[in-house]
Image (cartoon, helix red, strand yellow):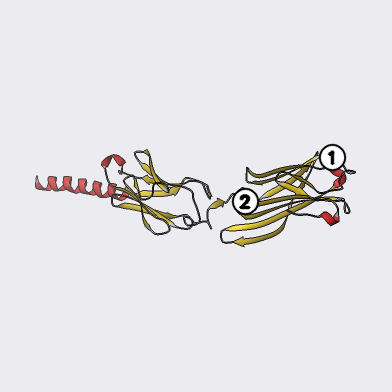
Amino acid sequence: MILFSFVIVYIVSLTSATTDRSSKVLIDVQEDRLVFGETVELVCHLQGSLNLEDGSSRQWSGGAFNKVLSLNGYSSDISKYQEVIKTNTEFRLRVLNFNESDANQYYKCVYGFKYNETKLDLTKKLYEYIPGESEIDTRFIVNNESEIVTTYVRFQKMYPEPQCVVYADKSSVNMTIESKRTIGLFLNVSLNSEIKTAECCGREITMICSVGTRVIVRRTMEIPECDDRNELVKLPEITFGTGVQNKTQV
């Protein structure tokens, strides 16, 4: 009888130990591509017997100062960190307005005595920085002497490299990189292209720059007739000059 009781206790203990070993937390990043200025969401998955209904403590920590970011739903900075519960087996941390201080930092999720961590490693993760209007300079320059329309765009800060195309009537020209510098995590990039004036006199030309499927620049300019370009013409947002002496860039 004593032996039988010992066998039962041993089996129960062994089962509990096996279950405990299979109980763990995993962490991953919801987004395939991290976008600066937008929200990044970290996901903590509960495995095995772990379940939010058992009432164990939830915690997120890490970031630039390796501190507690959220404890049982209470954020250390509600404008920056928000916990979201999706199911009984996962909880998430939203990092709002993702920026340089958030990048390449470790983040840890803790549930009871189980934990895991991950690094927002930009050497292994795709990321984007979409420039604002103040970080973009676009110009159209008409040169009568060479009979060339030059289109130019400069991004003071962006990532990754853009794809820029100029469309004139039914033709198109890919813009080429004129200069490129790496500044920390980002790029400073200038691109240009040239079109013969005969191909666009009296027509609209449009510059479009994209990162992936996202259009970040769309500029359109109507080029005067070929015999009507004797002075500098200014339109909203874009300036283009005429004649070699008026190769003005604003």
Task: Say which element carries label 1.
Answer: loop
Residue 126 versus residue 174: which sits nearer the camera? 174
Task: Say which element carries label 2.
Answer: helix
Using the rendered view, name the quadrant where residue 119 is placed: bottom left
Do the residues under discs 1 and 2 have CB atoms within 8 angstroms? no
Residue 232 versus residue 80: which sits nearer the camera? 232
- Can residue 174 be seen at all in this image of the molecule? no
- Can residue 201 be seen at all in this image of the molecule? yes
Which numbered disc, 1 or 2, marks the residue that appears first in the sequence?
Answer: 2
Separation (CA) of disc 1 from disc 2: 30 Å
Is 201 above or below relative to 247?
Answer: above
Task: Please report the residue visible at 70 percent of the width from the left and 56 percent of the height from the top.
Answer: 190
Question: Counting other residues with Cα less than 10 Å from the Cα at mark 2, is it few (<14), some (14-19), or many (20 or more)?
Answer: few
With 9 as the anchor, is 43 left or right in this view? Answer: right
Among all residues in the image, which is located at the extreme right?
Answer: 227
Indicate the amino acid at tag 1: Gly
Horizontal and vertical percent position of residue 137: 68, 52
**Quadrant for the N terminus in the image:** top left
Among all residues in the image, which is located at the extreme front?
Answer: 231
Name the residue beneath numbered marker 1.
202
Residue 8 versus residue 80: which sits nearer the camera? 80
Question: Counting other residues with Cα less than 10 Å from the Cα at mark 1, is it few (<14), some (14-19), or many (20 or more)?
Answer: some
- Count of numbered circles in the view: 2
Indicate the amino acid at tag 2: Ser
Name the residue beneath numbered marker 2.
134
Horizontal and vertical percent position of residue 103: 49, 56
Horizontal and vertical percent position of residue 43: 41, 46
With 238 as the anchor, is 25 left or right in this view? Answer: left
